[in-house]
Image (spheres, rainbow, N blue to C red):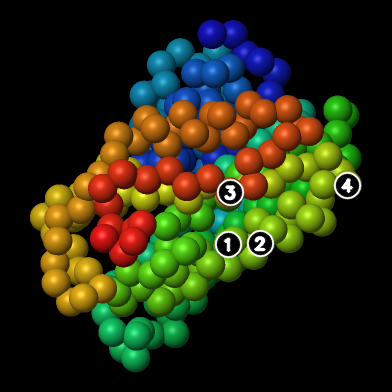
Amino acid sequence: MTGNGKVALVTGAGSGIGRAASLALHGAGYAVVLAGRRMEKLEATIAAAGPSNGRLLAVAADVSQPEPVRALFSKTVETFGRLDLLFNNAGSNAPGIPFEDLTFEQWSKVVGVNLTGAFLCAQEAIKIMKSQTPRGGRIINNGSISAHAPRPNSAPYTASKHGMTGLTKCISLDCRKYDIACGQIDIGNAVTEMTERMAAGVPQADGTRAVEARMDIRHVADAILYMANLPLEANVQFMTVMATKMPFVGRG
């Protein structure tokens, strides 16, 4: 497919949901900037896309730090001239240990990537989107079912994802005057490397362990494409896409 003239930037693009979203956006005609910590993972995503026609760019960046984020977005504009979509997807987690045993470093790392990273990337995206011609763009934040309900021993991740919901609402409110739409996708148990452990059983709130249902990651990519392709006069504020039989609705 030829390009559609739109430019997307995906963080955490080297694996899982970030890779699936990047491939889907590229297949739909977007030029895509793939951001992540490890260049070899980003290059594997590019290889999976097939012929790129110059519409794929990999940039290694730690989104939890201001300088790499500024360089990432500067490179995006230098290469493609504008930015139409930011998918804030990069995420980190801490070991599933008791709340009182978490270290400051474990807490800070998760919040730094999941929440501060989303803030820093959104800030740079907004600066570009409000000043480009045509003006505006869209930001999609990766929330998670953890934006609604915690798993056992998940305080840093859950707190960061609850914070993401507040960030999404603030961006949506503060930036609509610039024709910038912001929404959040909350994903439950897509088949990725991160959810492989669920096939063997994971801790539940009642202290038991249970195998959890998972869903094909393509359903997540399709949902992100739907959100991305809406005209800027319309917005999906929040969407939950989850494996039908996973424990969430009704707590079971």
Give the answer, above or below, for where 3 lies relative to 216.
Answer: above
- Nearer the observer, 115 or 161: 161
Q: Which of marks 3 and 1 precedes in the sequence?
A: 1
- Nearer the observer, 6 or 14: 6
Residue at 29%, 39% (x, y): give it: 215
Q: Which of marks 4 and 1 precedes in the sequence?
A: 1
Q: Nearer the viewer, mark 2 or mark 3?
A: 3
Callouts 4 and 2 close, C-beta under 8 Å: no
Residue at 79%, 55% (x, y): give it: 173
Dot 1: what SS?
A: helix
Q: Is residue 77 visible?
A: no
Alpha-carbon distance for marks 3 and 4?
Answer: 20 Å
Q: Amino acid at mark 2?
A: Leu
Callouts 1 and 4 close, C-beta under 8 Å: no
Q: Quadrant of the N terminus?
A: top right
Q: Which residue is mark 3?
A: 238
Q: Is residue 233 visible?
A: yes
Q: Which numbered dot is residue 177?
A: 4
Q: Which residue is mark 2?
A: 167
Q: Which residue is mark 1?
A: 164
Q: Residue furthest front?
A: 250
Give the answer, above or below, for where 19 lies relative to 66.
Answer: above
- Residue 180 in percent (x, y) is at 78, 42
Callouts 1 and 2 close, C-beta under 8 Å: yes
Q: Is residue 80 left or right of residue 211?
A: right
Q: Amino acid at mark 4?
A: Lys
Q: Which of marks 2 and 4 precedes in the sequence?
A: 2
- Nearer the observer, 173 or 17: 173
